[in-house]
Image: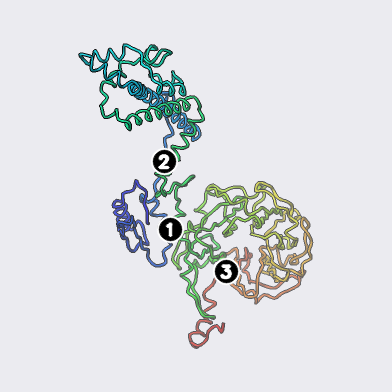
Amino acid sequence: IDELPYQVNKRTLLEKVGELVNEKKIDGISDLRDESDKSGMRVVIELKRNEVPEVVLNCLYKQTQLQDTFGMNMVALVDGQPRLLNLKQMLDCFLSHRREVITRRTVFELRKARERAHIQEGLAVALDNVDEIIALIKASPTPADARRGLMGRLWLSTTVGEMLQRATLDATRPEGLGLEYGLSKNGYLLSEAQAQAILELRLQRLTGLEREKIVADYGELLARIADLMDILARPERISEIIVEELTGIRAQFGDKRRSEIVLNTQDLGIEDFITPQDMVVTLSHTGYIKSQPLTDYRSQRRGGRGKQAASVKEDDFVDHLFIANTHDFILCFSNRGRVYWLKVYEVPQGARTGRGKPIVNMFPLEEGEKINAILPIKEFTEDRFIFMCTSQGTVKKTPLSDFSNPRKAGIIAVALDDDDFLIGAEITGGTHDIVLVSDAGKAVWFDEEDVRPMGRTARGVRGMRLGEGQQVLSLLVAENHQETVLVATENGFGKRTVLADFRHSGRGTQGVIAIAASERNGKVVAARLVHDDDEIMLITTGGVLIRTRVSEIRELGRATQGVTLIALDAGEKLAGLEKVVETEDDQEAGQEASDEDPTAQDPT
């Protein structure tokens, strides 16, 4: 800090910073030094390793006088009355005040110049008649008689006559001077002030050089009087003087500003004190969310065991995991069609073995409302979209930029009918493949371009035509035609089918068969895009969770009835299917192999 605002006391500032560091209210400062000397003021603040300077600086701005905010009372007396002025009115009043000051100053200077010129005028008359005046003074018995003698006759003066002819006669006359005094056709009549000045004239002023000086001074006063009268006669001259004087002030005092004046400032928010950091965010199937620093996950060799991101209950598992910066947003969509904003730094941090916090407690949800889609967002760009689908087959695509203004109470993302609800939301780039799967085993595959972008409050368009009592279960956004769709039914059966095997049926149709509907299979309960190396979790109505590898499920044609995914007890149904995004136990074998062979490592 090389310079500080003039209103800040350096010693007080240093004491305050030291106090905040000692009280642990500001972290990250390792040393504080005052290096001020005769060359200027300098304060050095050293930070600890890996600290972010902007965050520490924001803390200093917020809690010390390093940055100060003050209000300006724009009230001024205008014509004797207090008025609240805007900036333009304030400038108008200032210029009007400067005009009045310059006018009154000019009038004062003109009066003084006339009084001085009047005296110099009398001395010039005396110099033209010096012999007669000396004789008159010598013949007078007293100074009063001499003064009366000087005032009692007319004097001839070619010097004064010529100068007064060039200047206006009345322009040089002082205020209150009688009209009989001064120059007339017959000569010059001295006033009492002039006569007194002549009597007080020192003899040395009668030398040739002094006589020329008196006449030159008189001429300069006449020119000064003419200039002052021109100022009073022409308003543009006053404007020029205002500009000249303000320019002179700027030249004299316009040094570099030490304190920065910032327009349209905003108070520092909590985000300004959060260090930008990559976090691992996890959301469990039962709705527990938490975050952990990415640095908690060590870099490992191929085949390493890794670290488990979250410890969950036996009847729970992690089905959402992503990496995001602390300053990124998380868009949370509810089944009621509303969207809520959450900053990554607002997600509660927990230990590796902690469960986190129920996500439903972080928003003002209504009764029966639940979060069923979360999307990490770094930037609200125009070229990306939020694609949504409801249980009644309505789809909608809204530009991501429409969600760039967070509101604590949430906003409507899609307008829903009373018997409808939002089943999913995904981020798209405008050219993806969209697949909708219904509980009747039908699938609709269409291009994202078939749905035009629309505003937040729009109801959307038909994405899939449904039969009576049917509903859409899954919204799938595919990158290419070679991705695999896994479909599961309530009786524990399912199959994998390559998306290319589905017919491109188009938006708004009933679609094609994704899995044969039969009494054996029952209704479809879930559909997911999967890869061979994925793991899935099968959830039954009895609370049983079965984890299995996708590679163990055969790929079959779309019209087949599928294979057994899970053996159900009597009266039990398959309730759902979710991808498991993180696991620890399945990597133990690889870690053991790595431990046995310490030379085994990634060849890359």
Residue bearing the label numbered 1: 55
The label shown at residue 581 is 3
Comparing 502 with 182, the one in front is: 182
* Foreground pick, 588 / 412: 412
Q: Is mark 3 on a helix, strand or loop?
A: loop
Of badges 1 and 2, nearer the viewer stands 2
- Looking at the picture, tell me which residue is in the foreground, 65 or 531: 65
- Circle 3 packing at 10 Å, graded few (<14), some (14-19), many (20+), is some
Q: Do the residues labelled 3 and 2 touch (CB within 8 Å)?
A: no
For image coordinates 31% across by 22% down, the residue present is 130
Q: How crowded is mark 2: few (under 14 residues within 10 Å), some or many (20 or more)?
A: few
Q: Which numbered circle lies on residue 249? A: 2
Q: Which of marks 3 and 2 is in front?
A: 2
- Out of 372 and 262, give the one closest to the viewer: 262
- What amino acid type is highlighted by mark number 3? Val
Q: Whole-percent x and y of residue 282?
A: 52, 64
Looking at the picture, which amino acid does disc 1 mark? Val
